[in-house]
Image (cartoon, helix red, strand yellow):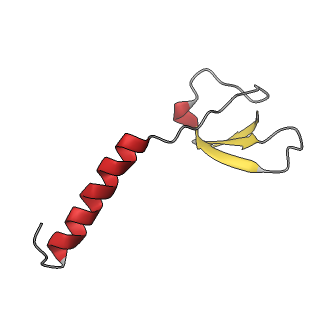
Amino acid sequence: MIVDRFEGEIAVLLVRPEETQQILFPRALLPGVNEGDNLELAVEKREAESAIARERVLSTIDRLQGKEV
């Protein structure tokens, strides 16, 4: 993807090769990056952290609904 432009604190990234899809990304997370720079973005699903967060949410819902935990 390429950094198309900055709009205040937001970086507008265009997905290559077509450059028709935009991703808005916090500029603060891209130190040293300039307009026109090419970036590679990797996304990884974190199973263990997801399971912990899911359990915490379900526990909170149960508590709010007055169910035994």
Q: How many marks?
A: 0
Measured from the top left, where is residue 46 in percent x and y? 45, 40
The quarter of the rendered structure image containing the C terminus is: bottom left
**Residue 1, image quadrant:** top right
Q: Quadrant of residue 5?
A: top right
Residue 1 appears left or right of 48: right
Q: Name the residue located 71 percent from the left edge and 28 percent from the top edge.
A: 39
Q: Is residue 56 above or below residue 4?
A: below
Query: Quick check: 12 left or right of 18?
Result: left
Residue appearing at x 42%, y 43% in the figure: 47
Left or right placement of residue 10 versus residue 16 in this view: left
Of residues 29 and 5, the one nearer the viewer is 29
| On screen, residue 56 above or below 23 | below
Query: Looking at the picture, how far across and down is residue 49, in whole percent?
Result: 36, 43
What's the residue at 74%, 49% (across, down)?
Answer: 22
Q: Quadrant of residue 3?
A: top right
Q: Residue furthest bottom?
A: 65
Residue 38, percent across and down?
76, 26
Q: Position of residue 15 (x, y in %)?
A: 78, 42
Residue lying furthest top: 32
**Is 61 rendered above or below residue 40?**
below
Q: Viewed as shown, does residue 22 lie left or right of 55?
A: right
Residue at 36 percent of width and 41 percent of height: 48
